[in-house]
Amino acid sequence: MLKKKSLLVIAFTLCLLMVFAAPAVMAYEMTIRLSNAGPADEEDRTYIANDIFKQVVETGTDGRITVETYHASELADERETYEGMIIGTIEMGTLTTGPLPGFFEDILVLDIPYLFDSAPVAWEVMNGPFGEKMNERIREETGIIPLAWADHGFRHFTNDIRPVEEPSDMEGLTIRTMENPAHMEMVRALGADPTPMAFGELYLGLEQGVVDGQETPITLIKNMGFYEVQDYLVLDGHLYNYLGIFISEEVYNSLSEADQRVIREAAQIWEKVQTGYSRVQIERGVAELEEAGMHVTHLSPERLEAFREATQGPVIEYLEEEIGREIIDEIFEAIEEAKANI
């Protein structure tokens, strides 16, 4: 009888432990570091969007999850952030796709020159079936989860040597690129010399003449102060630049379903804020750069077509060898579908 009573006491005690321990398990605390290579400028679109993401997550989790935001590659540059998320040492990042081919090669298909003729088409592609399939493959092959894709703007060439009005004007220029082979092939096709360089080192590289020029969206040309060390800008829009918000799958899977939902919802808000501010800053940015003294070249449709003809063929030929023709056909089909849906 005593033995049975002892067992009942033990069982009752275990039940009490389970009931009272459950809230403690749910009440875990976590710090998420959000790494961004863009400027530490309170007026920059990504700075603003990341701060709002932080507020939504911290409010939605009653402060159990703290988000620390890092800018200007303070925590890590883009490539290091991707690496950190893969191995679980960095929780999240707001990143371009530039270094991503080093971990997921098929993302190169987005770097076909002059692929998109408008930002809405680019948004439709990545928010549709093509983008959903790409997101899942990134997760499966890298352990990084893309939560949302936002606008980062079309990329344009700048330099401090001469105006660029036609492809031949690029010949001989040393142009900083990201560590992205498709970008480098594009620059070579224009007769220029691609020079990979970490984004955090770019301003000094331009100032010291290590490179003649670079290619980034309008907002970065302005907010990073590149106009201070570059005289010429050509609005060629050779690449559309997505900015993604990513989370380490290992970190994501450690969260409760409720907190995962908060993260996903905050990422959707981040996308709207980033894209909205981006469009505003791009629209006013060109005029501000001209007022600051930059010589801005606006290309006619005929001259723009010359740039497309000079670059698209060689880059597609390179990509066919690297990632195959199937995914190239898929992106062009997705673009046609997107145009029909808009």
Image (tube, helix red, strand yellow):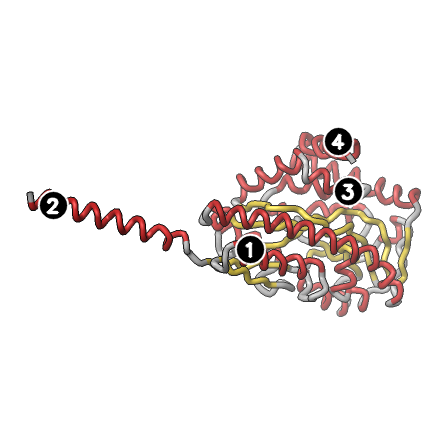
Q: Position of residue 72 (x, y in %)?
A: 65, 64
Label 3 sits on residue: 120
- Residue drawn at (56%, 45%) of the image: 145
Amino acid type, mark 3: Pro
- Return the residue nearer the eye: 103 or 127: 127
Amino acid type, mark 4: Glu
**Which one is closest to the eye, mark 2 or mark 3?**
2
Earlier-in-chain disc, 3 versus 1 = 1
Amino acid type, mark 2: Lys
Label 2 sits on residue: 5
Q: Quadrant of the N terminus?
A: top left
Label 1 sits on residue: 57
What secondary structure is marked by label 2? helix
The answer to whether 20 appears left or right of 311 in the picture is left
- Residue drawn at (11%, 45%) of the image: 5
User: Label 3 vs label 1: CA separation?
Assistant: 28 Å
Are the two marked residues, 2 and 4, in contact with CB atoms closer than 8 angstroms?
no
